[in-house]
Image: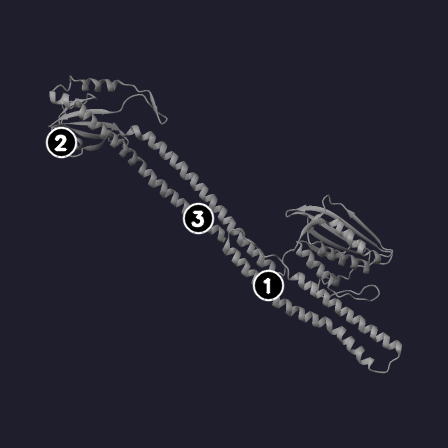
Amino acid sequence: MRFSLRIFLGYFLLVALLAVYVLTVVRDEIKPAMRQSAEEVLLDSANLLAEMVKADFIAGQLNDGRFASALAQFGLRRPQAEVWGMAHDRTHLRVYITDARGVVVLDSAQQSVGADFSRWRDVALTLRGQYGARTTQADPKNPLSTVMYVAAPIRDGDRVIGVLTISRPNLVMQPYIERSEKKLARLVLIVLLLGLGTGALFSWWLSRGITQLTDFARNVSVGQSVAVPRFIANRELTSLAAALGAMRDELDGKAYIENYVHELTHELKSPLAGIRASAEVLHDELGEADRARFLQHIDAEVGRMQRIVDYLLQLASIEARHELQQAQAFSLTALIEQQLAALESLRAQRQISLRTEAADDTVYGEAFLLGQAIRNVLQNALDFTAADGRIALTLESYRDARGMWLKLNIYNDGEAIPEYAIAKVFDRFYSLPRPGGQKSTGLGLVLTRTIVQLHGGSITLDNAAERGVDVVITLPQA
């Protein structure tokens, strides 16, 4: 299982458990909170009504007084009100009054007059001077049928002479409770989805960073020159990438020097041996023609060594770079035409044509380096093409899953490359004899490939289908 998937699953489990816990806790608090608020309102109402009924109660005119009449009219009211989206078409309060013995003397519901309520908590505690309240289930089979009773004492001075109790069914509050629970559930679901979305985004972001580091390490392992990944708002991955880049540079530097020393030593052995042999011969008595011939040989070998050193210095400079410097957008067609113009003196009778089929030939990079790469390929094509030969350049664009690309095909109708040499043409110091027997430094195509790869492209060389050689340079379109 991928590391990022493990993080996401762990984050999902944590967020889900937290959401369920919060939903459970808050839902369990909704009903008690509403009932506590309702109890406070009933308590205030009971004390207010106890003061209002006290005069009639003491005068013995409870059933004939204004309070009893108002209570009867209250039961007949139909409010036709809408409270927080809930319709109310009748009143739900019930009021009953007991005397000092706990016997009901007035009941707005006309259900319990004469009944002994002295054992009910609301009446019993109030008669003892304490706060009296109870919640009783009206229907034993229905747990939602509870009724809240809150009592207040009716006093004559400091003496409790009766109890007034107000009751209200808790079922009246149930629609509000259910609506609050639904809103809470929706809110928790939204928070859960947002949390999971954030977790997925974070996991993708972390996985993408790890994938970039993995690709960077893989590219380095196969010898590709790639830039060190950069990460926004991730100091740890940035530090790790910088450490990997520094390690790559350190290891590349050691291997690079060791490899170059071996290759340069091997390549310079032959011209050095030739120079030494020619120098020894020059110590002898020679004719002017022989002396001139050996001096010319020494001069040619020194020139070849100088070209090797120059190429190696330039190649080392480019291979040490992992990204472009001072890059800009420019026309690839215009760059090719510049290189053809620069090689005008070497074209002789060769037929050279350039056909551009790309609607947009803009590339992004360092024009000087790409120009040098294209010139190296053109120089090779001229060297291996007969005086009356043909060189054709075709530039076209295409799209693949990675984006838009420009493909430059450079064809020459010279002799085919031996099959054994095709796989070696991009090796350092490997070269084939030109027509006439001359050999190059074997570094031109190596330098060209390095430049093309630095620009994010690729280069291939192969024999054409019929006769000649095809070189294909592919570059990302700007």
Q: Is residue 250 left or right of residue 203?
A: right
Residue 442 in the image, given as x and y percentages of width and height: 74, 65
Mark 2 to mark 3: distance in Å?
58 Å
Q: Earlier in the sequence, mark 1 or mark 3?
A: 3
Q: In the image, is residue 231 above or below residue 111?
A: below
Judge by depth and name the residue closer to the eye, 474 or 343. 343
Q: CA distance from mark 1 to mark 3?
A: 37 Å
Give the spatial CA distance, label 1 vs label 2. 92 Å
Q: Position of residue 140 (x, y in %)?
A: 24, 31
Circle on res. 428 = none
Q: Secondary structure at mark 2?
A: helix
Location of residue 81 in the rendering, given as x and y in whole percent from the top left corner? 33, 22
Decide which of tag 1 and tag 2 comes sooner along the chain.
Answer: 2
What amino acid is at disc 1? Asp
User: Secondary structure under badge 1?
Assistant: helix
Q: Residues within 10 Å of mark 2 (few under 14, many from 20)?
A: many
Residue underneath mark 2 = 127
Asked whether, in this view, residue 267 is left or right of residue 293, the answer is left
Which mark's residue is nearer the viewer, 2 or 3? 2
Instruction: State the residue at coordinates (46%, 51%).
Output: 7
45 on left or right of 213: left
Q: Residues within 10 Å of mark 1 (few under 14, many from 20)?
A: some
Disc assigned to residue 11: 3
Residue wearing tag 1: 249
